[in-house]
Amino acid sequence: MDVTQITETPVRPDHVPVKFWDPDAGTIRVDALLKSYQELERKLSTPPDPAAEKAKALSLLGVPASADEYCIRCDHGLFGPDTEINARLHGAGYTPEQAQLLYDLAAEKLVPLLQEMAEGYQAEAELEKLIGHFGGEEKWRDLSGQMLAWGQRNLPAPLLSALSGTADGVMALHRLMADGGGEPKVLRPGAGEGDGEGMGDLNRMIADPRYWRDRDPGFIAKVTEGFRRTYGS
């Protein structure tokens, strides 16, 4: 045999990946190399999906996949989780901890402020009611001063404060002043016991939610009549 006819199969160069080398032929697999190149070119020419990229980035920051995964606690009972708000928080990239903090701050700061505003609007409405009832601002100013002075002279401070808190209470105070001739008798200890309302009874009636919260007409009339019997002439 002529040794010049014996040839060795070339060995794969180190820089050529195994998947691109044909060990039998000792050559590069051009078809595999071309296919891989075409796949790489396709990936490079396809623009990335912004939504997918954003979701991936948010996931790394701890943002859940959807707003439904927020577990908001509202143990205070003032309000509950809101689906629309949660969706907006999720869209803004809030983590569950940040979303919970926002709800907690709303309960701590915003709700008391709204309640204060509501009380202010209610006070304005009560004042407008009194001004209209007594015939205008000028008459109301004069009469309110008279009622305050009369009440301070003749009524216990807690009762005067309770009556002054609402328009209906002020109107009841005005009726008491008119029915008593301007200077009713001051309640004596034990007065009204047995056949009428004493001072303690009136205090309890004014503290009753039917008077200050529900504004029950029948109960208000009963309280007013109690004032008349107790403080009247």
Image (cartoon, rainbow, N blue to C red):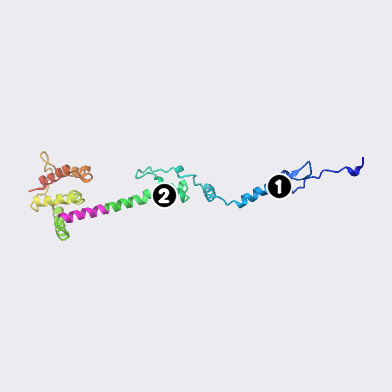
Pointer 1 local density, CA inside 10 Å: few below 14, some 14–19, many at least 20: some
Three-letter residue code for mark 1 = Leu
Residue under the image location 19 percent in, 53 percent down: 129
Question: Of the residues shown, which amino acid type is indicated by label 2?
Answer: Leu
Residue positioned 20% across, 55% down in the render: 128
Depth check: 125 or 202 in front?
Answer: 125
Whether residue 98 is visible here, answered yes or no, is no
Left or right: residue 75 compared with residue 29: left
Q: What residue is shown with label 1?
A: 33
Mark linked to residue 14: none
Q: Which residue is mark 2?
A: 102
Kindly give the residue lying farthest to the top in the view shown.
Answer: 194
Report the magenta residues as a range.
120-133
105 vs 22, nearest the viewer = 22
Secondary structure at badge 1 equals helix
Residue 131 falls inside the magenta stretch: yes
**Left or right placement of residue 90 versus residue 209 in this view:** right
